[in-house]
Image: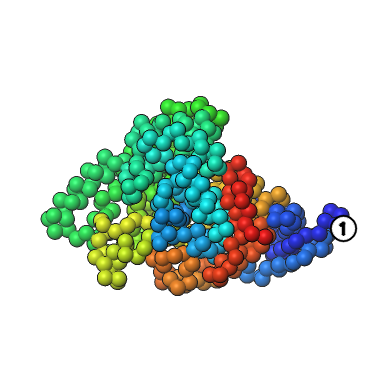
Amino acid sequence: MGPSSGLDLLVLAERAVLPGGTRAAALGVRDGRIAVVVDLDRRGDLPAARQVLELADDEVLLPGLVDTHVHVNEPGRTAWEGFDTATRAAALGGVTTVVDMPLNSVPATTTADALRVKHDAARGAVHVDVGFWGGVVPGNTRELAGLVAGGVFGAKCFTTPSGVDEFEHVSPAQLREGLAELARLGSRLLVHAEDPHVLDEAAEQVARRVAEGADPRSFALFLASRPASAEDSAVADVVAAARELRGLGPGGAQVHVVHLASASALPLVAAARAEGLPVTAETCPHYLTLDAAAVPDGATQFKCCPPVRSAQTQDALWAALEAGVLDSVVSDHSPCTPDLKLLQEDGGTGDFLAAWGGIASVQLGLPVVWTAARERGVPLERVVGWMAARPAARVGLAGRKGSLVVGADADLAVLAPEEELLVEPGSLAFRNKVTPYAGQRLRGVVRSTWLRGRRVDGADAGARPRGGLLHAAGGVVEDGPA
């Protein structure tokens, strides 16, 4: 580098999580990108920087996390969540890239026009970089080309009712129709995979039990209404669809199972991958850390679909991550207004069968997962891979997001991994402060977050949004304010 090639930011870290492992490093930033990464003892070879960030001895430098499963809900249900609050919460949690789900906003992101509505709502309001998923619903196959051209990273469908009327679930034939079109377009299909027939049978059995006096506040009863066999059956059909459509399009029939919670579905995913099918799957912090046996009756803040399952299932999910059967850990941040949770402490019924299902955690994913990983002897580097590098690669942003490499966006998180964090609802930046992690003591405090070389912690409700809108081709549709 010549004398005119000064740096905007120089970060000095005794511990930096790099693709090759954790080591002492100096990282230089220019024009929002990582310009150089060298051993810390070579920092004297670097040009001057306008700003120097020297990490404390108890801090570790991480790439900004990439959360590809966030329900922002704006517009239409902004009382549930919005771009400002969701992305401020993400920044506070070390997340620098989110990809927004096509529901529960109104309109749902199932047409190119609806995508433009999303862009209008997000423009100038996001504190981190934001991309978008489209949606596959009955009858919108012809809309998928416009969505892909508009920059979505893929499209999601439900095989069972989604919970909102404007986002209908698809039949097996409609799933294949959408998957074939997305394959032709070089894109991917995301699937909420639960078999509606299995769920209907389970619901009938549960309804009979309630009629006989069973308590709808019972978490065990709710668990019986969403058996793992529903996931297993739907995942088997997803794999069959990928096999039937093998060879379509430039990348094959790419299909991704979201929020997998069934241990017995894991062999299906593993076999599909061994067969060479482009089938991937993710899981979430709540499935890795919450135990169904410990969920109190009436504690509807724990409700999500699929549900939290057993400690044995947790063990299987962790093993699948280690083996590469599961490729990422994402939040499935799915908040609602507190009244929809029917919380007993707020005067509600605590009815698990009637409450809205969804867990809010975009701000807490890293400490939740790291706390459990630490107890299991899983190193921080693995956690970063599951929550940054792998989700970035899955949406085509490898080399741009999720890793500290030259040429990548300078998206950084500074973590104090041993510092204790008490989860207090008042400290949460997402709009509705309902979370099953309230009162937990976790390990890992994110002390600062940087987006393309600029600090964007989001702690201040009046902080200026600096995030941009991402296009699947790798570009920024609109950059944030200077």
Image coords of residue 285 (percent x, y): 45, 57
Q: Quadrant of residue 311?
A: bottom left
Image side of residue 258 versus residue 13, left or right? left
Query: Percent x, y for residue 405?
Result: 69, 51
Is residue 182 visible in the rendered image? The answer is yes
The single residue placed furthest to the right in the displayed view is: 3
Q: Residue at x 22, y 48 (%)?
A: 203
At 52% from the left and 60% from the top, the residue drawn is 87
In which quadrant of the rendered image does the C terminus lie? bottom right
- Residue at which label 1 appears: 3
Q: Which element type, helix, strand or loop, lies under badge 1?
A: loop
Q: Is 475 or 282 nearer to us in this picture?
A: 475
Tell me which amino acid carries mark 1. Answer: Pro
- Which residue shows up at 40% across the image and 62% down it? 79
User: Quick one: which residue is furthest to the left in this view?
Assistant: 212
115 or 224: which is nearer to us? 115
Where 216 falls versus 20 (above or below)?
A: below
